[in-house]
Image (cartoon, helix red, strand yellow):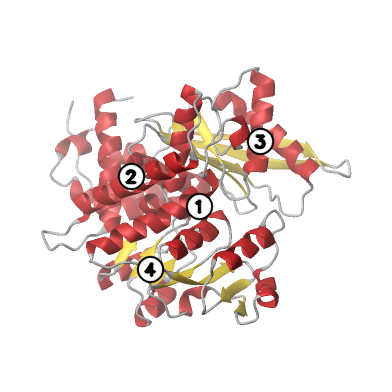
């Protein structure tokens, strides 16, 4: 095979933008990875010859379909659904389904691209995918959500399967939605297989799946701290978001000794200087569960706290920032304020919550910074464990699953440390480490298959 011309990084990125017009989230995700991978493959001609990075940055397929459903008033409604199957070099496609008005093809392509590297880091045999629809469950009745989920799966079922593509939940898709989709898949195919993860424990789900992403974030942060000889005892943490990831990250951080002082939602953020203890977190879980109630109500229950409307928590003095809400929620100005206030670590609970400017500022400052593809991989790791339980039809105990989660997060951390250490200085660039470790596993599998 003739060796292809080695393009430089600007030329590569220009090609990505040209091939993906109007898709800024996807281009941003590719750029964030390419900045590190291009340096790594500079002297490795085989990756250039086989155009590995360009092939990873071109999804295997993007499936788009209409989803028709009927609301409670008898009106016919129409949404668009997608499944982006990015890469299955190391295993069946794996990634969540998101129901939210902000869902676009660009968002799902970025998430599927990120998922490819995240899944590779777990060490489990899972490729990368993502799916969803521009359907907003907020304000919909249970029956409307059921009808939508059934219609969505009626289109999706032909593209998924236990050995093909195993979706999970994501924003707007929890155990209720997974149950409705799994029921429809079972109905259509007349089979009971592990085609979805995040199922209820009573019909094949895994213990602590709901908690896994947030718990994993906390474990990864603790592993990072150990490289500096630190621990979490007494450290002040600012957490954004108020969903499963944020609440369970706050819960585990508190158990590990940190003092979590913030949570946020679309209406603003709560600042509780005393910290979120077990009682407060239990109240929050009940307050937010299925109701999407504003965090403003927290102050009525716990008057010592303050609610800050229409603001994000990054101006609060803290040792650790944990963005768990959504992509690009923490920008350059936020990063500068965190650094001025003495923040020593940022660990991403959401997918790409920091802008490229913020990422560059954190890396230049030399603080501990963990990208989402490494730090929030606990959720998909336990999804992988759910696949194993389904395949053997043998459920595990919660302690068995959490013990495995701790090992997987430690393994991810060690891979990032191995590939991210800068020139023997002892300083770990976790972004570089995660990108290179994930790329290497996927790329080497692709080389083994030839040009396919």
Q: Which residue is mark 3?
A: 179
* Mark carried by residue 407: 2
Residue found 54% across the figure and 39% down from its top: 168
What SS does tag 1 mark?
A: loop
Q: Secondary structure at mark 2?
A: helix
**Mark closest to the chain's N terminus, 3 or 2:** 3
Q: Name the residue carrying label 4.
A: 358
Residue 195 sits above or below residue 357 on the image: above
User: Where does residue 339 sit, x and y in percent of width and height?
Assistant: 35, 77
The label on residue 395 is none
SS at badge 4: helix
Q: Which residue is mark 1?
A: 22
Residue at mark 3 to residue at mark 4: CA–CA distance: 38 Å
Earlier residue among tags 3 and 4 = 3
Q: Residue furthest top?
A: 190
Question: In this view, which residue lies farthest toward the left?
Answer: 424
Residue 118 in sight: yes
Q: CA distance from mark 3 to mark 1?
A: 34 Å
Q: Is residue 324 visible in the rendered structure shown here?
A: no
Tell me the distance, in whole angstroms, between the alpha carbons under discs 3 and 2.
29 Å
**First along the sequence among labels 4 and 2:** 4
What is the C-alpha distance between the residues marked 1 and 4?
A: 22 Å
> In this figure, what is the number of numbered marks?
4
Q: Earlier in the sequence, mark 3 or mark 1?
A: 1
Query: Which circle, 3 or 1, is nearer the viewer?
Result: 3
Label 1 neighbourhood size at 10 Å, few (<14), some (14-19), many (20+)?
A: few
């Amino acid at each position: 095979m003739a060796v292809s011309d080695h393009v430089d990084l600007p030329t590569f990125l220009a090609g990505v933008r040209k091939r993906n017009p109007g898709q800024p989230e996807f281009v941003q995700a590719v750029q964030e990875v390419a900045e590190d991978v291009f340096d790594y493959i500079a002297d490795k001609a085989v990756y250039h010859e086989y155009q590995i990075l360009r092939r990873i940055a071109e999804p295997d397929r993007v499936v788009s379909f209409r989803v028709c459903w009927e609301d409670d008033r008898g009106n016919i409604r129409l949404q668009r659904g997608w499944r982006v199957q990015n890469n299955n070099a190391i295993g069946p496609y794996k990634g969540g389904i998101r129901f939210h008005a902000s869902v676009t093809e660009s968002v799902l392509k970025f998430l599927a691209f990120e998922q490819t590297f995240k899944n590779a880091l777990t060490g489990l045999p899972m490729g990368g995918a993502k799916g969803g629809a521009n359907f907003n469950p907020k304000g919909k009745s249970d029956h409307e959500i059921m009808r939508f989920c059934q219609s969505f799966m009626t289109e999706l079922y032909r593209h998924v399967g236990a050995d093909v593509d195993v979706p999970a939940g994501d924003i707007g898709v929890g155990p209720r939605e997974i149950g409705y989709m799994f029921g429809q898949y079972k109905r259509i195919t007349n089979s009971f297989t592990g085609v979805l993860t995040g199922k209820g424990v009573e019909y094949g789900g895994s213990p602590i799946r709901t908690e896994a992403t947030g718990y994993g974030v906390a474990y990864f942060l603790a592993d990072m701290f150990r490289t500096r000889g630190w621990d979490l005892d007494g450290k002040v943490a600012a957490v954004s978001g108020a969903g499963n990831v944020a609440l369970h990250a706050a819960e585990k951080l508190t158990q590990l000794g940190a003092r979590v002082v913030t949570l946020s939602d679309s209406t603003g953020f709560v600042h509780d200087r005393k910290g979120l203890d077990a009682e407060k977190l239990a109240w929050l879980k009940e307050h937010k569960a299925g109701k999407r109630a504003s965090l403003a109500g927290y102050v009525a229950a716990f008057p010592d706290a303050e609610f800050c409307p229409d603001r994000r928590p990054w101006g609060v003095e803290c040792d650790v920032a944990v963005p768990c809400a959504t992509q690009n929620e923490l920008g350059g100005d936020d990063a500068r304020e965190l650094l001025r206030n003495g923040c020593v670590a940022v660990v991403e609970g959401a997918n790409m919550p920091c802008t490229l400017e913020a990422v560059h500022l954190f890396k230049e400052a030399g603080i501990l910074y963990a990208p989402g593809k490494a730090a929030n991989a606990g959720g998909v790791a336990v999804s992988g464990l759910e696949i194993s339980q389904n395949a053997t039809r043998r459920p595990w105990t919660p302690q068995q699953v959490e013990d495995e989660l701790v090992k997987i997060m430690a393994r991810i951390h060690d891979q990032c440390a191995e590939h991210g250490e800068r020139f023997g200085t002892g300083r770990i660039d976790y972004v570089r480490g995660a990108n290179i470790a994930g790329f290497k596993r996927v790329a080497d599998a692709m080389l083994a298959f030839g040009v396919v």
